[in-house]
Amino acid sequence: MTYDYDVIIIGSGPAGFSCAMQSTKFNKKVLIVEASDESIGGSWISKGTIPSKALRAAAKSIQSFQSQFGDPKGRKPYDRFRMEDIMAYKMPILENKNRKIKNDIIKNEIDTARGWGKIIDEHTVEVTDQMGEKKTWSTRFIFLSTGSSPVTPDKLSIDHTKVLDYTTILDLTHIPHRLAIIGNGIIAIEYATIFSALGTRVTILSEDSETLPFLDQEIRDALFNTFKKNGIQLLHNVVVKKISYNDLRNCDEVTFREGEDGRLQVIETEQILYAAGKKPNTEGIGLENLAIKTDDQGRLIVNNVFQTDVPSVYAGGDLIGPTNLASASFVQGRLAAVHMFGNKAAAAAPDSPMPFAIYSIPEIASIGLTEEQAGERGIDATVGRAYYENMTRADLDHETDGLLKLVFRTDNLQLLGIHIYGENAGDLIHLGQSVMHLNGTIEYFIDQVLNYPTYSEAYKVAAFNGLNRVNRTGIKYRNQPD
Ligand SMILES: Cc1cc2nc3c(=O)[nH]c(=O)nc-3n(C[C@H](O)[C@H](O)[C@H](O)COP(=O)(O)OP(=O)(O)OC[C@H]3O[C@@H](n4cnc5c(N)ncnc54)[C@H](O)[C@@H]3O)c2cc1C
């Protein structure tokens, strides 16, 4: 049987793009279908990772400038900088990224079709363009990577002017003086610290009883201390009752209770960000035509090589969750292509611990067991800590808020987890990840020369700190020389 394409990819985000790139390495004929007329590359470039990180980078520069050099007139960052300044920083980054993606697509001779992609049967995809014209193509494999969209609230309305979601907050034309954020996930926390760095007074209204409960407790405490220091208010168990406009005071108001029985409270705000999660984009893509299964969260169910129940249909990225990260999506798309066209044995998703980063200001990054998890599993573990205030690099950068924490086995010093709060955490985590992946011990950081002054030096300090703790308690580790 001959097909028009070897693989048709619906959605051009990190999962779809990496599936396309890897497929071309096997000399396969590839078509990417993308619904957006404006950009190619997925919400990763247009609404997610890149624009939020560009906004963060601008806010961080402004915050560093403000805190290092101050302001003789005592002005807030939003009095000195405008959203236009931030746009001027952000837009070239997005344009550049988009241009590079387009160039890669052209260079690798990947075909593109602009329009809405839908599965018709296990080897046919239909694309409807902006004018309503339909075309169908046959294909050996289909890769679904339609991503996710913001969850919309049942009772509140998002008008995208006063009440924004995580896509429309990027369209703000001014820096608000006050921002109320409904939600307490990663996106909510990132935007809270970004706007706080710009001088905005931020209140986080969380329906949950805990924030980022998966983090190591000390890292969470460090984050909450920064919140306190910077005046970010975090309220838990919040039940939002209504959002209304107060004509007299010329501001929006959020009315809520802390707990169902709590007293009614009102906060005044200039903007509201509703950031209570994402939902996979499964509607209208023809899943019903093949009875492709989804889980209770609406995410596509795939096996460890990203294949759905229909062997010719694969899926990756936010559509399958639950990592919901560009970093993981890139790997999933590539591995799916390897399974379609390459060595099937090499295509299984790695089962080693996965790192993640939260790009708050400062950053958070983590991999492996937290101190609490090691305890719950009955592992005899010790921790080693390095505080940024003791690091020369952090001193030089005025970045003294931070902690790097190692969790390792007491008996043989094997590294089990790394948890970092502070500048460069997202990058820094990968040194420890490599050591962990190779079943290394904290002795690596003690024995090896690490550049100085660097943030990586924190690994050495934390390793010495941990080793001292082991020795102080009189427990000698097995590998210790006589
Ligand atoms: C504010 C924010 C910050 C983030 N920060 C980070 C971060 O720092 N690090 C990180 O790793 N991840 C981050 N993420 C997550 C990351 O953006 C997503 O995990 C990633 O974009 C998911 O990739 P994807 O390939 O699944 O699809 P997406 O990037 O969502 O792209 C899906 C594409 O499919 C298209 N599409 C949808 N339906 C159809 C259809 N029927 N036909 C044709 N095309 C269709 C869409 O137009 C879109 O272009 C962030 C997300 C947000 C919202």
Image (tube, rainbow, N blue to C red):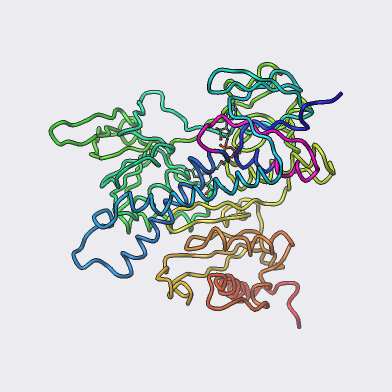
Residue 328 vertical placement versus 154 (above, below): below
Q: Nearer the viewer, residue 144 or 248?
A: 144
Residue 161 vertical placement versus 461 (above, below): above
Residue lying at 66% horizontally and 17% vertically, measured from the top left: 288
Which segment did they paint magenta?
Answer: 19-39
Residue 142 vertical placement versus 76 (above, below): above
At which x and y percent is residue 286? 64, 19
**Residue 193 in view in this figure:** no
Q: Quadrant of the N terminus?
A: top right
At which x and y percent is residue 268? 23, 39
Q: Is 95 on the left or on the right of 107, as rendered? A: left
Q: Nearer the viewer, residue 475 or 33?
A: 33
Q: Quadrant of residue 303?
A: top right
Q: Quadrant of the C terminus?
A: bottom right
At which x and y percent is residue 161? 32, 33
Residue lying at 36% horizontally and 54% vertically, measured from the top left: 227
